[in-house]
Image: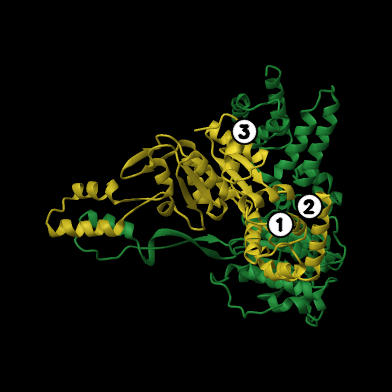
Amino acid sequence: MSRLLPNLVRFGRLLHDLGLDIQAGRMLDVARALPLIDIGRRQDFYYTLRTLLIHRADDLALFDQAFRAFWRPPRGERTRRDLRALGEQRRYGRPRVEQESLRADAESPEAASAPAPSPEKVELRTYSGRESLRQKDFGKLTAEELEQARALLAQFRWEPGFRRTLRWRGGGGRRPDLRQIVRDASRGAPETLALPGRERRRKPRPIVLLCDVSGSMERYSRMLLQLMVSITEGFQRVEAFVFATRLTRITLPLRAARRARAASPFAGRLAALAPDWSGGTRIGEALRAFHLHWARRVSSRGPVVLLISDGWDRGDPAALSREMARLQRGCHRLIWLNPLLGSPEYQPLTRGMQAALPFVDDFLPVHNLASLEDLAQRLNSLPDRRRSRRARTP
Amino acid sequence: MTFPTIDALQGALSGRRYIADRGLATSIFLALALRRPLLLEGEAGVGKTEVAKVLAAVLETDLIRLQCYEGLDVAHAVYEWNYPRQLLEIRLLQAEGALDRRAAERELFSREFLIRRPLLAALEHGGPPPVLLIDELDRADEEFEGYLLELLSDFQITIPELGTIQAAEPPIVVLTSNRTRELHDALKRRCLFHWIDYPDPAKELEILRAKAPEAPQRLAEQVAAFVAELRRAELYKKTGVSESLDWIAALVALDRQELDAETVDETLGLILKNQEDVEAIRGERARGILHRALAGGAHSAG
């Protein structure tokens, strides 16, 4: 026991350094718990530390490895290397984006060093200059225009309406507020003249972003990333994913980019996160992965789903319609944003688009700033009630 | 009441037909010994809720259950005033011409008009501390979690009209979550945490034998092996232990001695609760899974 305690403290510090949420108070609990169990049994010792020190399912595997690396027959400094490797693994599993590393990873040096243009600068531009920028296709923006567009986009407000929660709030509303009525009556109000009411509380609706980053979307991808950053910036409840052949969650790096206020070098960093950046697309499979691994955790509470893709799908159309149907059932509103829709001669004739369209609530262009303005306006005026949809089977 | 060792606890649980592995038993043991809330996470149907029930049974105490849902608020979790009765009382007092404001307020907001919801009931429970089960906490709103945080640290509730109510002895708290959303770290820090995984085939067999002793041994082995094989498939909703228990009960009712392809197809709805999953598995794939399960079962037996 005498040698155990200092080791426990070191182990606690190690877990802390690995990024686990370990608190000093918890180590005291461990000290209280150990006399209660048979520490000769390695298994009991392991589970005791685990149940007391870990409280997130995602951390279990890391704890397991740290435990095995730390609590083994002592062999000098050998452990150290293993533990560093663990830290790396953790960083891979839960990316944390720091400002320095963002800069280092930037694709081009100018992009990294140029500070985000301040809003005043934008205001000074002439209307006609802005108007042409508004109408210009994202795929054709020059580097300078991209910066301007980015600054304009930063001023957008995204508010996808409210959802009615099941909690009550006094004041207003048609349901009588009994609590208030009793209060009034007991204070001797002779007859209740006005019936105090209560109503359901409202909360902002969450947003789920699913963005196609396959080869055919490449010329739009920089601006679409800006769009995702902009939406995440103005609004708390956003979950973001990118996909081509695989689905990658980018919610946390996006939030980190928001904190670092460094969106431009972000694309380079993101490329490292999504290994199949600019490959082919399998939308159906990506959506299936979303449903299997994420939907239950991120798309409860009736989100508005924005699916951004040109619909060039190389997967099975039947699978795509099945997954689209499921996606639509699980959300408040399913909006498909297609950059090609900006071109007047475009017709959604690809197999993928054909398979998906019956399950889309809104089919909108996303090719220039004007279309984003329309989108913002439409989102901000979404009705609280779900659009009525005809029952369809995929 | 606590148990002297983890083994003793494990024995007591299996005496009530709950098969807990060492990890879970350690967590329960320490939650009792250190008097901390126990947070159980895991997929649906792995026996999280059952832990609280069986714990109340082995401790020979009451189980008080709070089922969480979206919109759960203090009025349904903690206490509410009995408004209709209060209004009636006011009318009576008025009729008698005896409505004195101060006295009325005191009288109307007394314990007589208080409706005790699970959390308050758990604190006011006399005798040995009850087991308080706060089930599927992830369904409740974040605001409620914040409230719970306060309750779990002090085990006291303040009712403005009555004052503070403190538990003589804190209840044994078991919280469960299906992880449809992440709970706040602040809440998790107050608790001992255990993740209940799907059991391996050997443990599942043990559970099936304990809970459905009337089923033939051979059938139980096959069910355990089949379900384990099935969980490897990519499914929207994996089969939980509760579903394999339902399944074996149904198979016994149908008087099946062994699994065969036809029976599996007919009863697939008992273990797969999602139409897409049923369609994906039924037929060819189910036969493949059955084949592997039977082969594996024969292997381990031989």
Q: Measure the alpha-carbon separation of dots 2 and 3.
A: 51 Å
Residue lying furthest top: A2
Front position in the image: A26 or A238: A26
* Quadrant assignment, res A238: bottom right
- N-term-proximal mark, 1 vs 2: 1
How many numbered circles are shown?
3
Front position in the image: A132 or A244: A244
> What chain is colored green?
A
Residue A88, relative to residue A358: is it above or below? above
The residue that disc 3 covers is B6
The colour applied to the residues of chain B in this rendering is: yellow
- Packing grade of label 2 (10 A; few <14, some 14-19, many >=20) is many
In the image, what residue occupies the spot 83% across and 63% down? A245
Mark 1 and mark 2 in contact? Answer it, CB < 8 Å: yes
The residue that disc 1 covers is A229
Of all chains, the one bearing label 2 is A
Q: Measure the alpha-carbon separation of dots 1 and 2.
A: 9 Å
Q: Nearer the viewer, mark 1 or mark 3?
A: 3
- Marks 2 and 3 belong to one chain: no
Residue B299: percent from the left, percent from the top?
84, 52
- Packing grade of label 1 (10 A; few <14, some 14-19, many >=20) is many
Q: Is residue A369 visible?
A: no
Residue A335: percent from the left, percent from the top?
68, 71
- Amino acid type assigned to the residue bearing label 3 in the image: Ile
- Amino acid type assigned to the residue bearing label 1 in the image: Val
Residue A224: percent from the left, percent from the top?
76, 63
Residue A38, relative to residue A293: is it above or below? above
